[in-house]
Amino acid sequence: MASSIGIGFLSLAHGHVGMYAQMIRGFDDAHPVACWDDNEARGKRHAESVGMAFSPHIEDTLNHPDVQCIVIGSETSKHADLAVAAMEAGKGVLVQKPMAITLADCDRMIATAERTGVWFSMAFQMRCDPVNIRMREMVQSGALGKVGTIRRRHCIGVLFVPSFYEGETRWHVTAEANKGMFFDDAIHPLDWLYWTTGRKPVSVVAEIGNILTEIAPDDTGCALYRFDDGMLADIYNSSVTWAGENTTEIYGDKGVLIQNHGDGPSSGILPPHPVALKFFDSGAGDKGWQDLQMPVDGQGERIAGVARPFIDAFKSGKPLCTGQEGRVSVEMCLAAYRSAETHQRVTFPFSEG
């Protein structure tokens, strides 16, 4: 194991990081070493499942000599304190999304990473997914021409599942730990939008609230972002969706991209002949819709797919998503909440004050 990177975990409250640990245990160049969790039963269970050490004392993981990088998988409200502690201990850090609940906490994490010089990255599975990578390449290469409108639907159905909001994962539905379900999950398409276009919006108008349930602070939201060249981006997120199909629509003056089956409900229930990504090229209109022959992955595969790029990025010294980039999606999401609360258009840059 001398050349293998030792990975530590601070909290496994978020289900995704448990999957990362399971994947990493099978790598030749990385292995889970140690973890801490303020829920001892949860921490011990995950530690035993991947063969790493558990300690109820956070210092044992922070100061473990065989740990080079620490994954933060706590409740969102605890991300900043845990990430700062890990960076102060000289460890690289991977933080599960969202980066933090406040921009002030995002800034604290960014400042600590800059001061300590350690490796810091956010974990966003869409940046590691082959279909999303292909769409980004096509947008940035100009294959669609000038993009006028983007529609992105990213949904889950967890508020229809009592074990989610009554079990260990119930922290997701509390405002103190996670703000709201739109904040928890719309952060994915918001990061995807910024990553794909390479641009920040200039304003947002949004509606966010409880439509079908009263379990969490909110269960559904829609945010319309405008960009400086007039481009519109419609982001829809719901935690009360049983099934879906169409995930992304990108309309340009030279072509159109349609992605299907890019979230949990749409990849869990597939139609008879699923197509992951199709393209209409105005310069080859006689071909009609072209199936780009991309894989139709399940949501579990997308989540598990973060582990390999994470280790490769750590080895290269380059993050999957920088702290500054992670802050952008938080700012976009908080601005959407402000718009929904005030019933007014909100402009960027956005301030919490």
Image: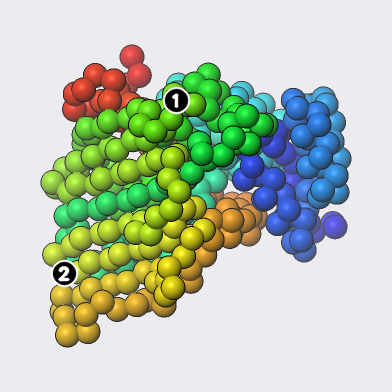
Q: Name the residue at 37% across, 69% down.
A: 277
| Residue holding disc 1 | 214
Q: x, y percentage for residue 173? A: 53, 27
The image's mark for residue 48 is none
Q: Quadrant of the C terminus?
A: top left
Q: x, y percentage for residue 208? A: 32, 30
Residue type at numbered disc 1: Glu
**Is 43 left, or right, of 105 in this rendering?**
right
- Is 191 located above or below residue 286 in the figure? above
Q: Name the residue at 76% across, 61% down.
A: 26
- Residue sitting at the far bottom: 286
Of labels 1 and 2, earlier in sequence is 1
The local crowd at label 2, few if under 14, some if 14 to 19, many if 20 or more residues have their Cα within 10 Å, is some
Residue 259 in sight from this viewpoint: yes
Q: x, y percentage for residue 15? A: 64, 42
The local crowd at label 1, few if under 14, some if 14 to 19, many if 20 or more residues have their Cα within 10 Å, is few
Between 349 and 316, the residue placed more toward the observer is: 349
- Is 106 located above or below residue 286 in the figure? above
Q: Determine whether label 1 and label 2 are within 8 Å by CB.
A: no
**Is 11 left, or right, of 121 in this rendering?**
right
Between 210 and 9, the residue placed more toward the observer is: 210
Q: x, y percentage for residue 28? A: 77, 63
Residue type at numbered disc 2: Lys
Q: Quadrant of the N terminus?
A: bottom right
Q: Name the residue at 43% across, 30% down.
A: 213
Q: Name the residue at 16% across, 43% down.
A: 228
Query: Which of the 4 quarters of the picture holds residue 188?
Result: top left
| Residue holding disc 2 | 254
Between 300 and 79, the residue placed more toward the observer is: 300
Query: Which of the 4 quarters of the picture holds residue 289?
Result: bottom left
